[in-house]
Amino acid sequence: MSSNRFVKDTGLTVRMTTVMFLLGLLFVGFFVVLMGIAAQAGAAGLIPVIGLIGVGIAWWQWYNSDKMALRAMRARVVTPEQAPELHGMIDRLCTLADMPKPVVAISDTDLPNAFATGRSPQRAAVCVTTGILNTLTAEELEGVLAHELSHVAHRDVLVMTVASSAGVIAGMITQWGQYGLFFGGGGRRDDDEDGPGALPLLLIALLVSVVVYAISFVLTRMLSRYRELCADRSGALLTQQPGALASALVKISGETNAIPQRDLREVSKMNAFFITPAVAGLSMRTLTSTHPSLEQRLEQLSKVAAELGRPFDGGFEQQR
């Protein structure tokens, strides 16, 4: 794994590691319980198959994450000749961070946003919208790009793919179980006297899967919020301009509120990737949010500014 010059935050790292440990513990416990239930139902062989399918789906999504995300946003890859200022900015940031340069793309939409994706720093893409290019100053855009490059350098797509595996598999079992596909055929019947019937075991498996999915969902969203805070901090320290990123976040949030709801719904599946979710007038202070609230992000950036001895106006000066 190649090194980079993004500054690490020990506190955030500890919190992210704790969440990953809990997700791993949940994953192992989930399979142990399901294997026991399946053995009682005479269908123990199905669990590894379902597990492999779930992991296979997660792997495919991770492996093709750059292509899928760019296609979802109808983005076009641009050359240095087509977007010289954008490429120049990313070249400079990659040199500062000592990391490979990603593919650069632009999505033609009024929505001001940006995202990064890819299975590794060597196979990544950074995409900005025409909306964000028309909204932000050069310093603000540089702050946004530094945030996105931090996601690439820290392999956040891989981290989130691994973290969501338990939820993916639990969701599959829940859906299949609803149609009687799980434990179907060859298992014990309700009138067997040697052990519990298949139907009660199916209900237990469904209940366990639903609980695991719910816990995994909350923990994964918590991890996502920590990753966003980490990218904010790392990006701000790389550019040494936390106020510029704060101003960009305020502008993006304000402009998003002016985008028609129909347009926001069209890109809603990309919210986890965006620097700020494409959601108008909704507070991010919930357990299910993929991003921290704007207030939380500005508070952290103000602390970074204090560390650097930089002035900080909370990002609202640019709005006046």
Image (spheres, rainbow, N blue to C red):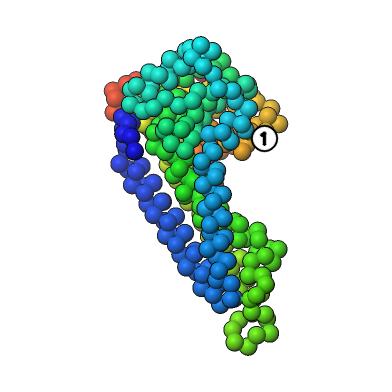
Q: Is residue 176 visible?
A: yes
In the rendered image, the residue lying farthest to the bottom is 193
Up-down: is 170 above or below 302?
Answer: below
Residue 265 placed where, x, y %?
67, 35
Up-down: is 162 above or below 261?
Answer: below
Q: Quadrant of residue 228?
A: top left
Name the image quarter holding the N terminus: top left
Q: Quadrant of residue 173?
A: bottom right
Badge 1 density bin: few <14, some 14–19, many ≥20, Cα 10 Å: few
Instruction: Look at 39% across and 33% down and name the residue there.
Output: 153
Q: Is residue 299 visible?
A: no
Instruction: Look at 42% across and 25% down and name the residue there.
Output: 101
Instruction: Look at 48% across and 14% down and name the residue there.
Output: 80
Residue 77 vs residue 243: left or right? right
Kind of residue at badge 1: Arg
Residue 287 vs residue 90: left or right? right
Per the image, label 1 sits on a secondary structure element best described as: helix
Q: Which residue position holds label 1?
A: 265
Residue 137 placed where, x, y %?
48, 15
Residue 212 placed where, x, y %?
53, 60
Instruction: Look at 68% across and 85% down and name the residue there.
Output: 191
Residue 112 vs residue 138: left or right? right
